[in-house]
Image (tube, helix red, strand yellow):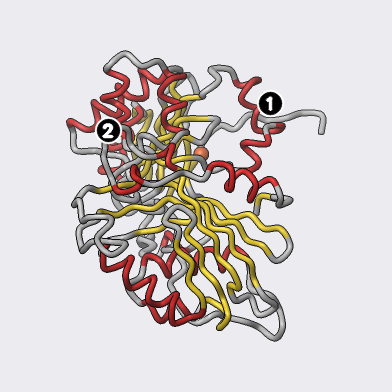
Amino acid sequence: MDTIPTLHHVNLKTTRLREMIDWYDTVVGLKPQHVDPVGAWLTNDAANHRLALLAFPGISDDVDKDSHSGLHHMAFEFSSLDELLGTFARLRTLGITPSACLDHGVTISMYYADPDRNVVELQVDNFHDWAKSSEYMRTSSEFAADPIGVVFDPDRAYDAFQTGKTHEELHRTMMAGRLMPDAPPPLVGLPPRVSLGPLQKQGDAKMDVVAVAEKFCAGWTSPDAEAFSMLFAPEACYTDIAFGIARRGRDQIMEHHRIWRTALPEFVMLNEHTYESGSTVIVKTVCYGSFSGGDLGGGKLKATFKSFRARAISVLELNEQSQILACTEYYDKSTMPIGDETPFDQLPWPHKDLAEALSTKTVTAS
Ligand SMILES: [Fe+2]
């Protein structure tokens, strides 16, 4: 191709033109160049327009937008973290808050929903240099392994930045999972996660490993212990390394699920990333909960009523029917919030086992 054009503008259809014009002015300083009853043309730089809005009669809202294909989001870039967090704070005073925030490794990003529930990303480049961040995206094995990154709590990030942390320090803290929110953020602009149900198989085709991972996480998030146990083969074993627990067979696994969910009634497990290697699936998860429902381990671990968020890795060995034959679970103690005492603090952390589990697999990003 001899001549490469420059991306110039995005055009959205809307049923609430005025509200959209005001929102884009407030959030990213897009000013209308021209407003017509059936549309508006807005810009926040030297281009004649960067965003157009069409409000023709007959346009209706897409109530199932999150599940439909099409544009997911558009992004606006700030030149510094100071500017991004400053905008976050300004919008917060106006009651406009992000739906989800992520450090993608390559950018720190905050996702907002506009009045039509289109997603708008506000970001800052972690390299401050498009050439370097492009190189990172193309060549980094870290990015290839996890292009989504780590969620963070914007209020915590803002407060940490106010204490004098640099962009680099805050980026490292976010990537280590130390600024995660107390509750998992929604999957902004995406359909709800896969719900737990019987294993779906078509003929002899193996179930998609991501579906296995999603069902495993949905199973832990659901109070339905029996449905969770049915994800496993009848002879399956479940090993929780940190707690020193080994369960065999569906009945014991069901009991394990019951005990855990009784101790942590609001337990949530989210699938952060799935890897597969042959019949092995490795699920990297983020877990949320609080020990509010009862003691664990025969009273060894007391109900502290403290909330926690932690990363975990579950290594799942599947059989031919895509049932889980063996599950080995590891918690990443380094993601525990510093100063928050939880029962996890009393646990030995098997770094060596985890390193071995991961190094013995040929891990490929899904
Ligand atoms: Fe983006």
Which quadrant would the C terminus be assigned to in this image? bottom right
Q: Residue 117 has which mark? A: none
* Quadrant of the drawing holding the N terminus: top right
Pick the front one: 52 or 23: 23
Q: Horizontal and vertical percent for residue 164? A: 31, 13
The residue sitting at 32% across, 32% down in the picture is 338
Q: Which residue is mark 2?
A: 339
Residue 361 placement (x, y as % from top left): 71, 52
Q: Specify the farthest residue to the right.
A: 2
Left or right, residue 295 beside residue 225: left
Looking at the image, which residue is at 51% across and 68% down? 238
Residue 345, x across and y down, in percent: 34, 42
- Cα distance between the residues tagged 1 and 2: 37 Å
| Residue ID for mark 1 | 135
Q: Where residue 133 appears, x then y in whole percent?
A: 61, 25
Viewer-nearest residue: 181 or 101: 181
SS label for mark 2? loop
Disc 1 residue type (three-letter): Glu
- Horizontally, residue 115 falls left or right of residue 325, namely left
Query: Going from the N terminus, do you reach mark 1 or mark 2 first?
Result: 1
Task: Kindly indicate the quadrant of the structure image that contains residue 95.
Answer: top left
* Most distant residue in the bottom direction: 203
Quick check: 190 above or below 32? below
Q: Amino acid at mark 2?
A: Gly
Which residue occupies 56% across, 32% down?
8
Residue 162, by quadrant, is top left
Could you classify mark 2 by the number of other residues whose Cα lies within 10 Å: few (under 14), some (14-19), or many (20 or more)? few
